[in-house]
Image (cartoon, rainbow, N blue to C red):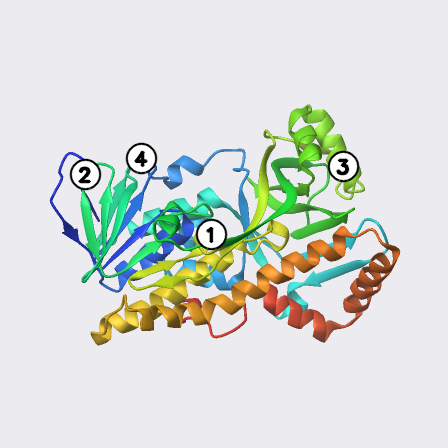
Amino acid sequence: MTTQSQAAKPPVTRFDAVIVGAGMVGTALAGLLAEAGMQVALVEAKASTLHLDDVAGEIPAPRVSALTPVSQRLLTHLGAWPAMQTARVTPYRYMEVWDAEGSGHIRFSADEAGTAVLGHIVENDVTLAALNEHVAKQPTLTRLNGVRVEALQTTARGRWLVLDDGRQLQTPLLVAADGARSALRALAGISVAEESMAQEAVVTTVRCAQPHGATARQAFIAGRPLAFLPLTVDGDDRYCSIVWSTTPEHAQALTACSAEALGQALGEAFDHRLGDVMPVDSAYRFPLVQRHAQHYVQPNFALVGDAAHSLHPLAGQGVNLGLMDAAVLAEEVVLAWRRGAPWGSVATLRRYERRRRFDNSAMLGLMKGFKGLFGSQHPVFTLARNVGMNGMNQLVPLKRLVMRQATGERGRLPLSCR
């Protein structure tokens, strides 16, 4: 890997692809393109790069993802998974979901799904640090840290970027991976449908009196889903990552109260299923907004990850959808590049959009539907969801179908994920 000094300001540097945003999705995409031999620039506003040595703390980071087996295969293909295992990953074999307002309950197991695990709970920092270790080995990848895109132009040869330090980049393929509030998406003039969920997510890490038993648990409490996601820290399996999607007023109260009061509130809301609960970190909150770009591609331009879509954390699918965006886009682009075809053309990029938009739209719609179903306190809806959950719990073939969807086994998977 090469690194350009900010003091050096060449007039124009050409790359086969430029990716703006070095989060998990952007870095994974950069790795996939670079390992194929493409000359790739990865542009990131943050000045420093996260390394595995930076994420070895005793207390897990508050932001985690439930990585599916399909995402695990992609990360293994990229060489990141072994490094993640040396840091901290927690497999879960079971998932329990129940309606705290009624009797509805459903339990999923890896055995019923025919898989070794249903997924892994992994700190986002661990995944990103491991991906950074991988891309650092790619000789055709150039990292540009501590810079932002100041201007964007369309030319006959593709896209022309001007960075805020004066450097200029030219590329046949520009990819926006710069998050839900993508500045690059705005510069490209792509509109986005945005809907507030009227909720905020409260996240923290807790230590419970009882072990989690490799089980991800989620309770629906008056339309406010509370998840206890399993974490194992130095062999201690009594840790959990908390995600409580609730009203802004309740979120503010939870993040303002003492650790003891927060632990008591979490334990009571969770019916003390894991005994007493004690937070080991501060609680953080952030607003929940679902977004979906009107389209993913333009000539020589594509959106991936949260820049294209962001959804409610209810099913923990956000990062998995983004990683699949990266895998599919890389597959279509590399195929065109190897054939000598214009890899930044609309024809090439629309193949990516066709393969990803339906799946992303379906997941966004499903999350909105779940929120509506479990958010209603009407007796008819309460009865319907409880009968439905209990009925599904008895139908193993239907549960297996649902679990295959949840583990990412849907649609035509790219080779890197098989």
From where the camera sits, is residue 278 visible?
A: yes
Nearest to N terminus: mark 2 or mark 1: 2
Nearest to N terminus: mark 3 or mark 4: 4
From the viewer's perspective, is residue 381 above or below residue 44?
A: below
Q: Position of residue 10 (x, y in %)?
A: 11, 43
* Residue 352 falls left or right of residue 114: left
Q: Toward which corner of the image does residue 342 lie, by quadrant?
A: bottom left
Q: Residue at label 3? A: 267
Say what amino acid the circle numbered 1 marks: Asp
* Residue 404 falls left or right of residue 373: left
- Badge 1 crowding class, 10 Å Cα cut-off, few under 14, some 14 to 19, many 20 or more, is many
- Quote the CA–CA distance across marks 1 and 4: 21 Å
Q: Toward which corner of the image does residue 399 lie, by quadrant?
A: bottom right
In the structure shown, which secondary structural element does the residue marked by tag 3 occupy?
helix
Q: Nearer the viewer, residue 382 or 320?
A: 382
User: Looking at the figure, which quarter contains the C terminus?
Assistant: bottom left
Q: Residue at label 1? A: 306
Q: Nearer the viewer, mark 2 or mark 1?
A: 2
Q: Residue at label 2? A: 166
Nearest to N terminus: mark 1 or mark 4: 4
Q: Residue at label 4? A: 47
Nearest to N terminus: mark 4 or mark 2: 4
- Quote the CA–CA distance across marks 1 and 3: 32 Å
From the viewer's perspective, is residue 238 above or below residue 89?
A: above
Marks 2 and 1 in Cβ contact (< 8 Å): no
- Badge 4 crowding class, 10 Å Cα cut-off, few under 14, some 14 to 19, many 20 or more, is few
Q: Nearer the viewer, mark 1 or mark 3?
A: 1
The structure residue drawn at horizontal position 70% and vertical position 54%, both measured from the top left corner, is 371
Say what amino acid the circle numbered 3 marks: Gly
